[in-house]
Image (spheres, rainbow, N blue to C red):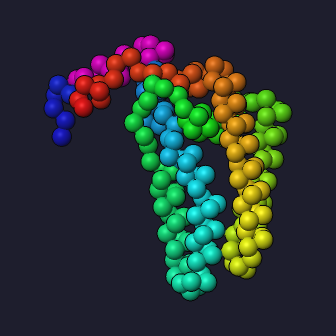
Amino acid sequence: MQTPERHQFQRVQAAHHRGHPANSVIGHLQKSAGVKQASTHATYAKILTPALLTLSIWSHIWIGTSAALALTVLTMAGLLFLQRQRMMSSTKPTWANAVGFGERIWLNRLHTPIPDKLSARITTLYLVYWLGAVIAYSGGIMTSLLLTSTGLAVAYSAQFVCFQKLALLFRQMKDTSPLYRFWSTAPDNDNSAKSA
C-alpha cells in the first residue's frame, strides 16, 4: 500500500518526465543501468565452456554414461549461471568488459549497423568456434584424444581471435550511440560506495 506522499512523488516524477523528453531518455538509461556494466564473469565463463564441457563428456569412461550426462547438464547450468552474474560497477574498463559490450553491439547489428568487414569476420569466427567445439564434444563421446585436442585447438583459436575482434568493435562503436556511450561512463555519484 502506497503512502499519499509516495503517490504524490510518483505523480510529480511522471509529469516531469512527460514534460522533458530528454529526461525520458535519461530515465530509460537509468532503468537499464542494472545491465550497464558488462559482466567479466560472462567472458571468463565462455573461455571455460569448451574445456569443462569436453571434460564432463569424457568422464563417461570413469563414472558411467548416466553420471556423465548428469555432470554435463550440471556443468552447463553452472556455466550459464556464472554468465548471468553481475559484477560491481567499475570505473575502469577491462578487456573482458570490452568483449561483453562488443558482443552486445554485434547482436544489435540489425538495429545499429556495424562495419561490414568486422561483422563478417566475427560471424565467421563464431561458426569456426562452434565447429571446433562440436568436434571436441564428439571426441569426448567417442573417446578420441585426436578429435578432442583438434576440436579444442580450433575452438580456442577462433574464440580468442573473435574476442579481440569484439573488443575492437566496441572501441570503434562506443561513441556512435547514446546507449553505447552510456555503457562506458562512470557514475557521477556512487551511493553504493557510501553505504559500504
Q: Nearer the viewer, residue 59 or 106?
A: 59
88 over 190 or under it: above or below: below
What is the magenta segment's predominant secondary structure?
helix
Q: Position of residue 54 (x, y in %)?
A: 64, 68
Q: Position of residue 85 (x, y in %)?
A: 44, 48
Which quarter of the picture shows residue 146? bottom right
Which quarter of the picture shows residue 141? bottom right
Residue at coordinates 51% horizontally, 77% vertically from top-left?
70
Total numbered badges shown on the rendered structure: 0
Q: Position of residue 117 (x, y in %)?
A: 84, 33
Residue at coordinates 52% horizontally, 57% vertically from top-left?
80
Q: Is residue 16 magenta?
A: yes
Whether residue 60 is visible, yes or no, is yes
Looking at the image, residue 33 sits to the left or right of residue 140; the answer is left
Q: Quadrant of the N terminus?
A: top left
172 over 48 or under it: above or below: above
Looking at the image, residue 47 sits to the left or right of residue 172; the answer is left
Q: Is residue 64 magenta?
A: no
Q: Nearer the viewer, residue 93 or 28?
A: 93
Q: Nearer the viewer, residue 163 or 9?
A: 163
Magenta stretch in the rendered image: 7-24
Whether residue 108 is visible, yes or no, is no
Q: Nearer the viewer, residue 105 or 73?
A: 73
Residue at coordinates 15% horizontally, 32% vertically from top-left?
3
Which quarter of the picture shows residue 194? top left
